[in-house]
Image: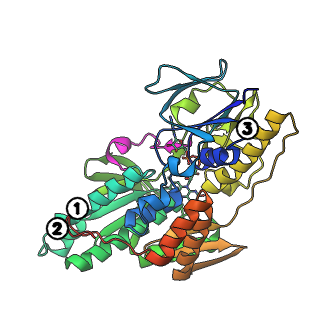
Amino acid sequence: MTKPKIVILGGGFGGLFTALDLAGTADVTLVSDADHFLFTPMLYEYLSGEVEAWHIAPRYDELLDESVHFIQSAVTGIDLASQTISLSGREKSLNYDVLVLALGGITNYVGVEGAQEFTLPFRKLAHADNLRQIMVDALDRIAPDMPPQDVRRELTFAVVGAGASGCELSTKMSDLLIDAFKRRALHGEPRVLVIEMGDRVVPGMGDQIREFVEEALLKSRVEVHTKTRVVKVAKDELTFEHEGNRESLKTAGVVWTGGVKMSPLIEQLDAEKNKRGLLIVKPTMQLSQHVNVFALGDIAFYPDATPTLAGTAQLAYQQASLAADNIKAYMQGREMHSRHFEELGEAISLGTERAAVLTGGKAFGGALARQARFALYTSRLPTWHHRLRVGASWFFGGTTPRPLLPLGFER
Ligand SMILES: Cc1cc2nc3c(=O)[nH]c(=O)nc-3n(C[C@H](O)[C@H](O)[C@H](O)COP(=O)(O)OP(=O)(O)OC[C@H]3O[C@@H](n4cnc5c(N)ncnc54)[C@H](O)[C@@H]3O)c2cc1C
């Protein structure tokens, strides 16, 4: 008897963990556009050099055995009627008996003029490499005798959006730049702004953890601009509006963490969606009109989940196990299940020295929280083998940041 063909699109938190759970149960194919998984919650630590690429971005061929067929390619079309998938650079399309959609979101520039062209996204290893290089280049342009006010103008970086991502990134960038100032004996200070439309930082998180975030932003000397809307971005310039006043700033770099939207592939899919364009899934993770199609993670709206979990790795990770169980049940003609998804706790990186963690209803911060976050994330990495290797490397090798030194001086 031939095994049913399961095709999983997207090798992130939803897709990879579903593939790992389904390995060996059917003819499983995972399709993703990169050759590696990315543990996004630690992309900030990759920027600062606290972790290395192999820690947080293991290659799929190290994570998957021969029971999962991996194809590195960009999905270019999904046809639910003919049950076929088109892939970039491949004439022959893939067909499936069961499809798993886990393609994640893309950066949402919300139509701000110049944002897509002149800001940096922060979702992939390459984005972090690029941002780090831009910071080093900007520092390299500063002469040691430049007056502090000129230095500040030349080294102004802005992060748009003060959600968890914007706060994690701005504190990390500011700590790295301040450290580089000391090492390079520059006059004055760098300037890092975080700009937020709403009236407070980390709007999706509870008050307990917000206190730690606000304190860390202050300690890392990040300028917080709430109730402020970015209206235009140009090369080296950012324009924003606060209470009717418009201001423009010269910038060395602007990073956009302002939101996530659906990719054109999901937008074009003929399936039921909510107002934000997310695929509405049944409590079993299936699309309502396609019993053999399951969707999860950032592209799926699952009704029975704590609202703060929307768009998080922890939701995608939990959904992967339900999706895999239900796919096995579907193939064997057994009853499928549903689950209520709960918040597993929150952990947020705050600069190179601190973090904040909320667990069991209690929040704590500082250096201890930083250690706890490393320990927690070791346990969330994919596969036992990888967890052990990374855990040992962090434990014995340490996790100190890599300073922003000029080219040739980096260790
Ligand atoms: C910098 C950053 C930090 C974050 N920190 C946290 C955190 O601390 N805690 C938390 O809970 N969540 C965090 N998140 C959110 C979390 O990463 C997402 O919610 C989670 O990754 C969603 O999982 P997913 O499987 O839906 O999508 P993803 O993990 O994004 O996976 C989608 C996969 O599909 C691939 N793909 C996309 N389009 C195509 C295509 N056309 N063809 C082939 N492959 C394609 C992508 O390359 C990717 O591998 C963070 C996100 C970012 C960007």
Q: Where is residue 346 in the image (x, y as percent from the top left)?
A: 63, 66
User: Is 111 within the magenta?
Assistant: yes
User: Is 321 within the magenta?
Assistant: no
Residue ID at (71%, 61%)? 343
Choose the circle earlier in sequence order: 1 or 3.
1
Is the distance from the Cβ of mark 1 to the nearest ligand 1 atom less than 8 Å? Answer: no
Q: Mark 1 points at which residue?
A: 138
Q: Position of residue 399 (x, y in %)?
A: 44, 74
Q: Position of residue 192 (x, y in %)?
A: 35, 66
Image mark for residue 346: none
Q: Residues within 10 Å of mark 3 (few under 14, many from 20)?
A: many
Dividing the image into 4 quarters, which one contains the C terminus?
bottom left
Q: Mark 2 points at which residue?
A: 142
Q: Residues within 10 Å of mark 2 (few under 14, many from 20)?
A: some
- Mark yes or no: residue 344 visible: yes
Identify residue type, mark 2. Ile
Does residue 250 appear to the left or right of 78 in the view shown? left
Span of residues in magenta: 104-120
Disc 2 vs disc 1: Cβ atoms closer than 8 Å? yes
Spatial CA distance of label 3 from label 2 is 53 Å
Of 297 and 409, which appears nearest the observer? Answer: 409
Residue ID at (46%, 43%)? 34
Identify residue type, mark 1. Ala
Give the vertical position of 34 relative to 63 (above or below).
Answer: above
